[in-house]
Amino acid sequence: MSPQELKDQKLRESYRALLLLLARKPMPDISVTELCQQAGVSRTYFYNHFGNFDEIILAAQEQEISRYLRELPNFQQVDLIGLMTRYFELAQREADNQLLLVKNGKIRVLMATFQQVYRRLLAESRILAKAPLEDYYIEFFAEAVINLSVTWLERGMPESPRLTGQKASRFLLRT
């Protein structure tokens, strides 16, 4: 296993362990030692790679979104509807984990992840529309999408990811 694959695996194990622990108790009651034991990683690994549990969530969410985007066929550039559809497909696939994070007050981490990935897609010219890089716009955009996603998930995903993505892009284009 390459060093990068090992690093990715340890991140996934740490994230999975954190989710398992969050399902049983609130984050303030989880110790670093407990997380490391559950994940099978050392405390040294934790402190060398993360400052807190939110950083595990952020890194794992970004890794998952990036992996999901890479898996999509012909994903060179995408328009807003395509981007939103892909996001809601991922949200559907990760529904239980996202709702668990929201329940534990980590919606801001989900927003920060979305912002990081969106900035990267813009920087790589993978979004067709001329979208502004202004921080306030990206903050607005991320909060709108994540809040809509949480509502959609909490309601049991009554519409398909494609329809929800179409609605989201229509809402965003009205602004």
Image: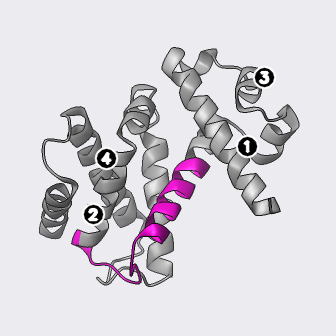
Q: Are marks 3 and 4 in contact (CB under 8 Å)?
A: no
Viewer-closest of 112 and 6: 6
Q: Amino acid at mark 4?
A: Gln
Q: Closer to us: mark 2 or mark 1? A: 2
Q: How many marks?
A: 4
Q: Amino acid at mark 3?
A: Thr
For the residues labelled 4 and 2, the Cα–Cα distance comes to 12 Å
Residue 105: quadrant of the picture: top left
| Residue under label 1 | 50
Q: What x and y, as percent, mark residue 174?
A: 12, 67
| Residue under label 3 | 33
Q: Are marks 3 and 2 in contact (CB under 8 Å)?
A: no
| Residue under label 2 | 84
**In the rendered structure, which disc, 3 or 4, sits on the residue that comes first in sequence?**
3
Q: Could you tell me which residue is drawn at 29 percent across and 82 percent down?
A: 129
Label 3, residues with CA under 10 Å away: few <14, some 14-19, many ≥20: few
In magenta stretch: residue 63: yes
Q: Amino acid at mark 1?
A: Phe
Name the secondary structure under disc 2.
helix
Observer able to see residue 55: yes
Observer able to see residue 140: no
Q: Closer to us: mark 3 or mark 1? A: 3
Q: Could you tell me which residue is drawn at 76 percent across and 29 percent down?
A: 36
Range drawn in magenta: 59-81
Label 2, residues with CA under 10 Å away: few <14, some 14-19, many ≥20: many
| Residue under label 4 | 92
Looking at the rendered image, the quarter that the C terminus falls into is: bottom left
**In the rendered structure, which disc, 3 or 2, sits on the residue that comes first in sequence?**
3
Q: Could you tell me which residue is drawn at 57 percent across and 42 percent down?
A: 57
Looking at the image, residue 147 sits to the left or right of residue 40; the answer is left
